[in-house]
Image (tube, rainbow, N blue to C red):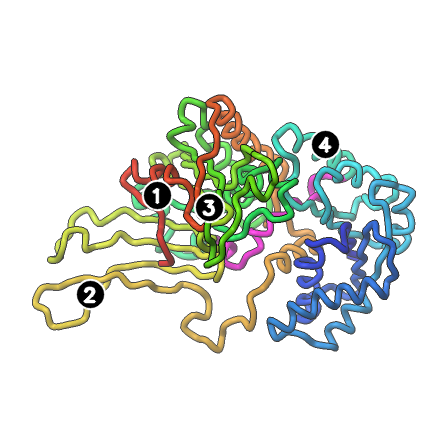
C-alpha cells in the first residue's frame, strides 16, 4: 500500500482519532514501510502548517499515554503531506493522484456521509479508484435504508465490494474481539451460549455528554440511528451469531447477517411494549447543572436522545431470550457494557436467606475500562456449620493476574481498523448486505413510532432515562444491571 489519504484530514475525527492512531502505530513499528500519509481538506495551508497542527494533536495524547518519542515523530513527519482539495471535483483531485503515485491507495472519508457519493465519483474520474485501491467509509452511511442504498450505489459504481471498508470503531476494541476468543476458543462457554442457560442479554451504551455543537446533525438522526443502528446491533451480532466455519472475513460476516435477518420485526401495535423513546431535560450530571435538549437546540424538538429496545431473535439458539438495548445522552455515567445474564440454579441445596444465590453473570465492559468478568457463587469464609455462599467477581481479561504482562497503554480502536484496512482484511468491517439488514430493522422501529405517534418521554439529565425504560424490564421480572460485575 503506497498511500493513505485522509479526506477531511484537518477535521475533528482525523485530529482526535485517526492521526494519533497512526502515530501510535508508527511508535510501535507497525506501519508499512514507505507508506505515505496525505491529509486532504479544503483549507489552504502549507505542509509545514499542517504538520505542526498534527503534532499538537498527537503529542498531547501521546504524552498522556507516556508514549511520546521524538524519533517516532520524526519518522511520522517524513510520511506526512498535505494538499488543499475540493474532494467533490475530479479536476481538483488530479494533483492528489500525482502525490499518491503509481502504488495502491487507501482513502479514508472522514467527512460528512452526505458527500460520499460525489467524492467517490470524483475519485473514480481522477484515477483514485483503481482495482488495487480501497475506500474506508465512516458511519453512519445514510439516514434510512433508501438513503443508504442511494449513497452505496454510488460507492459501488466506483469500487467493488471487496474494496469498500465500512468502519464501526467499536469492532476495533480489544474487548469486543476478545468476545470472539471467549466464545469460540473455550469449550466451557459455547455449550451454555443458548436459551437453555441464558436468561437474557443487556447492551448499554451510556454517555454523560449532551449533543453540544453536534445538534444540527443529531437532531436529524437521533439516538436510534446514531447509535443503535450500527454500534449496538454490531455488538448484538457478535453475542448472538453462530460459530463461523473459520475467521475468513465473509465467514464471520455471513453469521452476523443471519442474526440480523432473524430479528423479530417491531410493529406499531407492539412498539409501546418493546421500545422506549426519551429526551433529556435540565438536570445535574457529574455535579454540574446542565440544560435540556430543547434549550441546547434553541427550539422544541421531538428527536430522541435516549432509546431502549427489547429485541427478540427468532431462531433455535435464542428463542425466548430477550436482548435489551439502551443508549442515551446525559446519563449518570459513561458506560458501555454487554451483560450475559445466566438462568438461576433450578434448586438450592444451601441454607440462607431466600434469593441468597445469585445467578451467574458475564459482563463485558468496553468503557470506561475494558474488562471481561464472570460472577460466580463461592463459600463465605468462616466456621459456620451451615454453608453460606457469596458472589465473587473473577476477571477474565488478559494480564489481570500478571500486572507486569499488561499492555502499557489502552489502544485506540482505530489503530487495529486502520492496520486491517491497509492490509485488506475486512473481517471487522461491515458488508453491504449487513448494513442493509440493520437499516431495515431500524426503519421498522422508526415507522412503528410514527405509526403510533410516539413522542419522547422526558428524563432528567443525570438519570438512567425515562421510567418506561425500567418498566421495559420490570414487567418481565428483570432489571437493568446497576453497576460493574
Looking at the picture, how far across and down is residue 141, in whole percent?
65, 39
Callouts 3 and 1 close, C-beta under 8 Å: no
Packing grade of label 1 (10 A; few <14, some 14-19, many >=20) is some
Task: Tell me the SS state at disc 4.
Answer: helix
Is residue 178 highlighted in magenta? Answer: yes
Residue 52: name its quadrant: bottom right
Task: Tell me the SS state at disc 1.
Answer: strand
How much space separates mark 2 and mark 4, taking CA atoms? Answer: 60 Å
How much space separates mark 3 and mark 4, taking CA atoms? Answer: 31 Å
Instruction: Identify residue for label 2.
Output: 379
In-image side of 32 versus 210 (left or right) = right
Callouts 3 and 4 close, C-beta under 8 Å: no
In which quadrant will I find the C terminus? bottom left
Is the residue 164 above or below the residue 61 in the image?
above
Question: Chief secondary structure of the magenta span?
Answer: helix
Looking at the picture, how far across and down is residue 85, in whole percent?
86, 49
Residue 317 visible in image: no
On residue 243, which mark appears?
3
Looking at the picture, how far across and down is residue 8, in whole percent?
76, 51
Is the residue 336 above or below the residue 129 in the image?
below
Magenta span covers which residues? 159-180
N-term mark: 2 or 1 = 1
Packing grade of label 3 (10 A; few <14, some 14-19, many >=20) is some
Task: Tell me the SS state at disc 2.
Answer: strand
Is residue 413 highlighted in magenta? Answer: no
How much space separates mark 2 and mark 1, taking CA atoms? Answer: 26 Å
Residue for point 84% across, 61% down: 81
How much space separates mark 4 and mark 1, taking CA atoms? Answer: 38 Å
Instruction: Identify residue for label 1.
Output: 200
Amino acid at each position: 500500500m503506497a498511500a493513505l489519504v485522509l479526506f477531511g484530514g484537518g477535521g475533528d475525527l482525523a485530529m482526535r482519532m485517526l492521526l494519533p492512531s497512526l502515530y501510535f502505530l508508527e511508535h510501535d513499528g507497525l506501519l508499512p514501510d514507505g507508506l505515505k500519509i496525505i491529509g486532504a481538506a479544503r483549507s489552504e495551508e502549507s505542509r509545514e502548517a499542517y504538520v505542526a497542527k498534527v503534532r499538537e494533536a498527537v503529542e498531547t495524547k501521546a504524552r498522556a499515554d507516556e508514549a511520546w518519542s521524538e524519533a517516532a515523530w520524526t519518522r511520522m513527519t517524513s510520511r506526512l503531506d498535505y494538499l488543499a482539495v475540493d474532494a467533490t471535483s475530479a479536476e481538483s483531485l488530479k494533483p492528489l493522484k500525482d502525490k499518491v503515485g503509481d502504488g495502491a491507495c487507501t482513502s479514508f472519508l472522514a467527512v460528512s456521509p452526505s458527500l460520499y457519493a460525489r467524492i467517490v465519483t470524483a475519485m473514480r474520474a481522477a484515477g483514485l479508484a483503481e482495482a488495487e485501491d480501497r475506500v474506508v467509509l465512516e458511519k453512519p452511511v445514510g439516514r434510512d435504508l433508501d438513503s443508504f442504498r442511494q449513497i452505496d450505489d454510488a460507492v459501488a459504481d466506483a469500487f467493488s465490494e471487496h474494496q469498500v471498508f465500512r468502519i464501526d470503531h467499536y469492532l476495533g476494541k480489544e474487548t469486543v474481539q476478545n468476545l470472539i476468543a471467549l466464545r469460540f476458543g473455550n469449550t466451557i462457554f459455547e455449550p451454555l451460549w443458548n436459551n437453555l442457560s441464558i436468561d437474557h442479554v443487556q447492551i448499554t451504551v451510556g454517555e454523560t455528554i449532551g449533543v453540544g455543537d453536534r445538534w444540527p446533525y443529531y437532531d436529524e438522526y437521533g439516538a436510534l440511528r446514531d447509535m443503535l443502528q450500527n454500534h449496538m446491533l454490531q455488538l448484538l451480532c457478535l453475542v448472538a451469531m453462530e460459530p463461523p466455519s473459520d475467521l475468513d472475513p465473509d465467514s464471520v460476516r455471513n453469521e452476523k447477517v443471519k442474526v440480523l435477518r432473524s430479528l423479530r420485526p417491531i410493529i406499531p401495535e407492539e412498539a409501546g411494549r418493546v421500545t422506549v423513546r426519551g429526551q433529556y431535560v435540565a438536570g445535574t450530571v457529574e455535579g454540574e447543572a446542565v440544560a435540556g435538549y430543547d434549550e441546547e437546540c434553541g427550539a422544541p424538538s421531538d428527536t430522541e436522545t435516549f432509546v431502549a429496545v427489547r429485541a427478540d431473535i427468532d431462531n433455535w439458539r435464542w428463542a425466548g431470550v430477550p436482548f435489551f438495548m439502551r443508549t442515551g445522552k446525559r446519563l449518570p455515567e459513561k458506560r458501555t457494557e454487554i451483560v450475559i445474564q445466566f438462568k438461576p440454579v433450578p434448586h438450592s441445596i444451601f441454607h440462607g436467606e431466600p434469593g441468597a444465590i445469585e445467578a451467574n453473570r458475564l459482563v463485558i465492559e468496553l468503557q470506561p475500562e475494558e474488562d471481561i468478568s464472570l460472577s460466580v457463587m463461592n463459600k463465605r469464609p468462616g466456621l459456620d456449620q451451615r454453608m453460606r455462599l457469596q458472589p465473587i467477581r473473577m476477571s477474565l481479561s488478559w494480564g489481570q493476574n500478571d500486572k507486569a504482562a499488561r499492555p502499557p497503554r489502552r489502544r485506540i480502536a482505530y489503530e487495529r481498523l486502520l492496520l486491517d484496512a491497509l492490509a485488506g482484511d475486512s473481517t471487522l468491517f461491515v458488508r453491504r448486505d449487513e448494513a442493509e439488514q440493520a437499516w431495515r430493522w431500524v426503519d421498522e422501529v422508526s415507522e412503528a413510532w410514527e405509526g403510533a405517534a410516539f413522542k419522547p418521554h422526558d428524563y432528567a439529565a443525570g438519570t438512567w432515562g425515562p421510567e418506561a425504560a425500567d418498566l421495559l424490564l420490570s414487567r418481565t421480572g428483570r432489571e437493568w444491571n446497576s453497576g460493574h460485575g
